[in-house]
Image (spheres, rainbow, N blue to C red):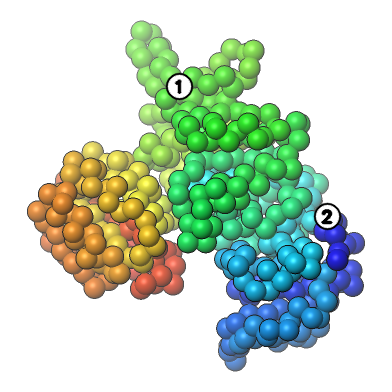
Amino acid sequence: MANWSRGREYFQHKQVLVLGAARSGIAAAHLLLKLGAEVVLNDRSKASEADKWIDELEEKGAKLILGEHPQDLLQYGFDLIVKNPGIPYTHPYLQEASAKGIPVITEIELGYAIMEGRLIGITGSNGKTTTTTLVGEIFGLSNPSTIVAGNIGKVFSEQVQESNPSSVVVTELSSFQLKGTRLFRPHIACLLNLYPHHLDYHQTMEDYISSKMRLFKKQEERDYAVLNWDQELIRTVAGQIKAQTYWFSRHEEVSQGAYIAERKINGVGEQWIFFKRKGEAPRAIMPLSTILLLGEHNLENVLASITIAILGGVAQEDIVKVIQTFRGVEHRLEYVTEKGGVRYYNDSKATNPEATEQAIKSFKEPVVLIAGGMERGSDLEELIPLFKTSVKALVAYGETKERFNRIAIEAGIKAVELAEDVSDAVKKAAKLAVAGDVILLSPACASWDLYSSFEERGRMFKEAVHSL
């Protein structure tokens, strides 16, 4: 058995199994070879002649076993397994590795072993990408060595190879990635929110929460934890954290952190964001009226970003400058265009009911909603109360369209259409909308029944809108 430790020297001459290819597995294999490890990459998918990465890895000395998971593979005597985050721990290899005492990590932990500089880790059920992007832009304004990586679509172990002692590495982290960490320690760690997600993978809410909380596991008292005061569940688990705790809240003044309160200037009251440390007077940061992002959920993302940036030593004027010009991230309440007085928004990243609920609440105008996709056992019925008050019409597509049809009928929505796909849904939604309405793609479901990713789904929506 080989004990896992941090540092480049650990990997020299180690026998390492990279389980699962995809972008993270391929990047991990390249890095391990660079560090002097002997690498076997195993993926159950068969090779394609178009896969250039296969030749590249073999030329560097990796052994590739593709198209199957041989039963006796672990007889090679591996010192370490780097697994694709999506592979469940019930996989036979991982069960066998656990019995043999072989460390199992994700490429996040591998990248952490070699990175330099300060690490900021951001997780949560919703809002991770928006917050990570915003924090990255804030730090990047004054620090050209800022790196943004992780679940945001940039492989962490690949990006941090460019890090140096002055770097700030801003990282979006999923529960899948965090579950495979051991020594991973962010200087600033942020938990945005917790909802019952990915239970098909984690099996229980307890395992999901435990995986998220690994973000804080190795933090020390000199580190910072940034948490959502408005979620009672997060307040409950905060007792596990050793780091200095800072909060953000849309509803209450917090003991230390960021919050919203009224500020009077010349007798006129306006909502502002304030920040304070314990024992210090609150500091006014910026008025809410100057924030471009739509939605109350995005106010939480802004509050979290401000807290992270101040704790990270960023000047207030830089923080405000970035937030006042930040329009959001593609596929997350992304404004597409206006046609005939109807505005179109792409919120394809909304892959669960909570995200769709937040999106709908962002609009005062009548909403024609496009929803549907892959069934993942989510409680879509929880959308019924909001459908009753805030959805004018519904166009449903994909695996869940009949279920959405039943929900719409129960909510009393009179205009309901079923579509074959997102492109068809756009055409039908356009016929249901009138000037002053909003057509919103916010599916509340995963994309994998019809599309390879939520990004592809969002692009198809935008193409269909522009071709109307």
Q: Residues within 10 Å of mark 2 (few under 14, many from 20)?
A: some
Which image quarter holds the C terminus?
bottom left
Give the amino acid at mark 2. Answer: Arg
Q: Which mark is residue 6?
A: 2
In x, y percent, where is residue 68?
62, 86
Q: Secondary structure at mark 1?
A: loop
Count every numbered label the image shows and give the total: 2
* Real-space CA distance between mark 1 and mark 2, rounded to the nearest whole angstrom: 41 Å
Rendering quarter of residue 8: bottom right
Rendering quarter of residue 6: bottom right
Q: Residue at x 15, y 63 (%)?
A: 417
Q: Which mark is residue 242?
A: none
Q: Residue at x 9, y 53 (%)?
A: 414
Left of 392 or right of it: where is 361? Answer: right
Question: Mark 1 highlights which residue?
Answer: 252
Q: Residue at x 29, y 47 (%)?
A: 382
Q: Is residue 403 visible?
A: yes
In x, y percent, where is residue 195?
45, 46
Front position in the image: 432 or 397: 397
In x, y percent, where is residue 220?
76, 35
